[in-house]
Image (spheres, rainbow, N blue to C red):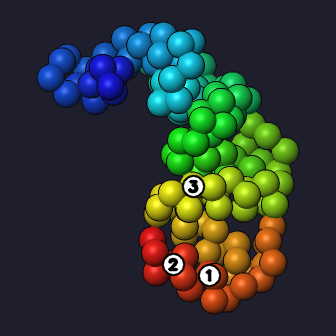
Amino acid sequence: ALGRCFAVGAGVVQDEEEAVKLYRQSAEQGYENGQYQLGYSYMRGIGGLAKNNEEAVRLFRQAAKQGLASAQAHLGFCCMHGIGVAHDVADAARYFRLAADQGHADAQCSLGYLCEHGQGTKRNLGEAVRLYRAA
């Protein structure tokens, strides 16, 4: 939480490098949100970090294993577009499903699209409509 405050300047002077330092400490202690935020920082190349999509995916996987919907949705996006990982629409659908089942709206939309078009999962228009409505 403190790292996010530094990232956006909420109650403190904005300092992305301090945010990344705090995310790293949190991630090293096994906290899923720290893993996710550090991964996002690598993906965007912020806080003094060089862009590194492979490291971002590694951190997203750690957070996703702990059930963090945002990390699961980002992993789905990475799999769908081959960012930091091999392009695999079936894996994308699996990660989107994990996040969608927790109410993550972006994942619901993405999985809805995959269901609508039968990409990475069986074509299911009823499921696509349900997901779109849920989002």
Question: From the viewer's perspective, is 102 left or right of 124?
Answer: left
- What residue do we see at 19% from left, 27% from top? 10
Q: What residue type is labelled 1?
A: Ala
Residue receiving disc 1: 128
**Label disc, if present, on residue 112 of the rendered structure:** none
Instruction: Please rate how many residues cluster around mark 1, counting C-alpha atoms within 10 Å: few if below 14, some from 14 to 19, many from 20.
Output: many
Camera sees residue 80: no
Instruction: Calculate the distance from the C-alpha at mark 2 to the C-alpha at mark 1.
Output: 6 Å
Q: Which of 30 and 6 is in front in this view?
A: 30
Q: Which amino acid does label 3 sit on?
A: Ala
Image quadrant in which you'd find residue 90 = bottom right
Q: What element carries label 3?
A: helix
**Label disc, if present, on residue 99 of the rendered structure:** 3
- What residue do we see at 65% from left, 30% from top? 62
Give whichever of discs 3 and 2 has the lower sequence position: 3
Q: Position of residue 23 (x, y in %)?
A: 46, 18
Residue receiving disc 2: 132
